[in-house]
Image (cartoon, rainbow, N blue to C red):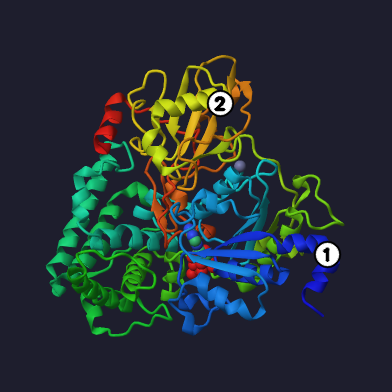
Amino acid sequence: MARETNLIKIIGEDNFQKLRSSKCLLVGAGGIGSELLKDLILMEFGEIHIVDLDTIDLSNLNRQFLFRQKDIKQPKSTTAVKAVQHFNNSKLVPYQGNVMDTSTFPLHWFEQFDIIFNALDNLAARRYVNKMSQFLSLPLLESGTAGFDGYMQPIIPGQTECFECTKKETPKTFPVCTIRSTPSQPIHCIVWAKNFLFNQLFASDASENEEGNKDWGTDDAEEIKRIKQETNELHELQKIIISKDESRVPEILHKLFIQDINKLLAIENLWKTRTKPTPLSDSQISGSSKINKFDSNSVGTIHEQINHFIKITQKLMNRYATEQSHIDFDKDDADTLEFVVTAANIRSHIFNIPMKSVFDIKQIAGNIIPAIATTNAIIAGLSSLISLRVLNLLKYAPVSKFTDLNMTFTAKASNLSQNRYLSNPKLAPPNCNCPVCSRVSRGVIKLSPDQLKKIKLSDLISLIRDKYDYPEDISLLDASDQRLLADYDFEDLNGRTLSEVNLGNGSIILFSDEEGDTMVRKSIELYFDVNDAFPHDTCKLPDIRIPLVKSSETSTNGDEDEDNDVATTTDKQEDGGIVILDEDEGEIELATDPLDDSKKRSANLEGFGEPSSKRKKLTNESADSDIIELD
Ligand SMILES: Nc1ncnc2c1ncn2[C@@H]1O[C@H](COP(=O)(O)OP(=O)(O)OP(=O)(O)O)[C@@H](O)[C@H]1O
Ligand SMILES: [Zn+2]
């Protein structure tokens, strides 16, 4: 029996032919992506285009079943395609690249697809694809897993909530003072060792920022003084590293684990309700050199930790000199990991906290949640199945309202006792406060590269004003960096061409009615799709109708968003590691959201997607300096 027969029975011959002529995009060929590729092939999608930026790692092989040992270091996308050829009936097109790279994957490239499947591992890329799907009104099936947890969300632009309509889980946080002065759990000591100590000792020129860095995280003068002093003293320790004098490493131990602990003990208030720490003794430091054992599988004794701290610091000291005076923490670099392990464990011992094994600390410091193949398979299976409904190919279950579709998420392990693993609530309509799918109208400007050099900002303003019937008083922002390009009292850039004001392929502008009447034209966000194939004489604005709305509904001031249940793009969410926040915020943040594992990529979406928030009006002076650079 041919494989497609079953599917034809379910969806009928006509719809099967529709599926055969559909093109889908799969973004990510990792854990979920490998599963999805198999599922989409078995469903016989006409074309499947697969984008992944990465190469295969040894650690991927346990669950990314399309890959073998011999494939290590090979691109994931092309290797995945080779691995499925023997059971494939679809046209497969692999790309090794970053889906956010607008030169390889411009907006018009996305336009060829009928549906997008996200199988990503970081927020920046998820947000980006969500945004592309919104600009093009392309259905997106968003998915993610973290250990036993997973979710799958169909997103139908304009009809259902988008990826940004709901707030994403914020990473776990700790107060700064807990980390610096009163740790009570192993994680507090690990954060201290990895973020404060390791960086101060092994980052390049830690002293450079000494005065330049004004962000001390607090306004309290006393506190700033204390932090400065602490930082300066750590710089002194970096001098020991730079000296390459191995015999001086015990001085580091002495300062961190005797002197500093004694200083803390002197602040009596701290210890009224807490157990006091016990500093190391001189003899513990000097006596440890006789011990020669360190077992990474067990915790061992404090003496073993001290001795290994000395050895590993000596090793890193020598590496520091040969590696351009800069070493980054990397969980897979045994030296850096063991430094953090031993420093954290010594601190734990001092504060009466249980010490941890290398394996345990690697999980915590490396922000690792083991991936579970079965969760990936379940989520990928649901994602491929729901695509039949999103494309409306199930005759017996026609979709008249997309909000009748379901999303799925797994219960937290703690809820399993209720015998419910999957929950599948109906989709919500778009959140009217979502900065990505609501609030403003959206469209794409299509223009050729030539036109970027010809069209002046003032021409663009007139074109938009005339096409959508905006009044005289408007404002124009570059939404990617919240740069003001023009408004009623800032016209300095109007004579410049679009390329002179740094607008190009992938730029997004926000055009707003600033007339101040009770009824105003809704703001419009326009994406620049630049392509040589577009006509060279006209610039095509999208044919959409921009409604008049009550002026209160068009607020583009981000401050008002603070209480809204919408996600915002923030640095803290983009960082897959541990982040230290301002002390005003009072917290140190541990990004435990494994769905936000952007460790291998640097997010370049800062501010992207927040057209209506944090509107930053530049003074003429600063705008001028922009122009000088451009000239
Ligand atoms: N911007 C991007 N463009 C293209 N592919 C991306 C992008 N961001 C992430 N990916 C890919 O998405 C996939 C996500 O898969 P997965 O969650 O299994 O992560 P992994 O990197 O394979 O595994 P792990 O992080 O657990 O070691 C990865 O293969 C990654 O390369
Ligand atoms: Zn939204």
* Label 2 within 8 A of ligand 2 by Cβ: no
Q: Earlier in the sequence, mark 2 or mark 1?
A: 1
User: Which secondary structure lies at badge 2?
Assistant: helix
Q: Relative to residue 451, is residue 172 drawn left or right?
A: right
Q: Residues within 10 Å of mark 1 (few under 14, many from 20)?
A: some
Front residue of 284 and 549: 549
Which residue shows up at 61% across the image and 28% down it? Answer: 546
Front residue of 369 and 456: 456
Which corner quadrant of the image does residue 626 belong to? top left
**Residue of label 1:** 13
Q: Are marks 2 and 1 in contact (CB under 8 Å)?
A: no
Q: Residues within 10 Å of mark 2 (few under 14, many from 20)?
A: some
Residue 358: horizontal and vertical position, in percent? 41, 75
- Which image quadrant: the N terminus? bottom right
- Is the residue 351 above or below the residue 482 in the image? below
Would you say residue 557 is visible in this rendering?
Answer: no
- Which image quadrant: the C terminus? top left
Front residue of 220 and 539: 539
Residue 171: horizontal and vertical position, in percent? 50, 53
Q: How far is mark 2 from mark 1, CA to CA?
A: 44 Å
Question: Tag 1: residue type?
Answer: Glu
Which corner quadrant of the image does residue 414 belong to? bottom right
- Is the residue 350 above or below the residue 159 in the image? below
Q: Of the numbered discs in the image, which one, if any, rests on residue 467?
A: 2
Front residue of 238 and 474: 474
Residue 501: horizontal and vertical position, in percent? 35, 35
Would you say residue 343 is visible in this rendering?
Answer: yes
User: Which secondary structure lies at badge 1?
Assistant: helix
Residue 322: horizontal and vertical position, in percent? 18, 71
Q: Of the numbered discs in the image, which one, if any, rests on residue 62?
A: none
Q: Relative to residue 66, is residue 487 drawn left or right?
A: left
Question: Tag 2: residue type?
Answer: Lys
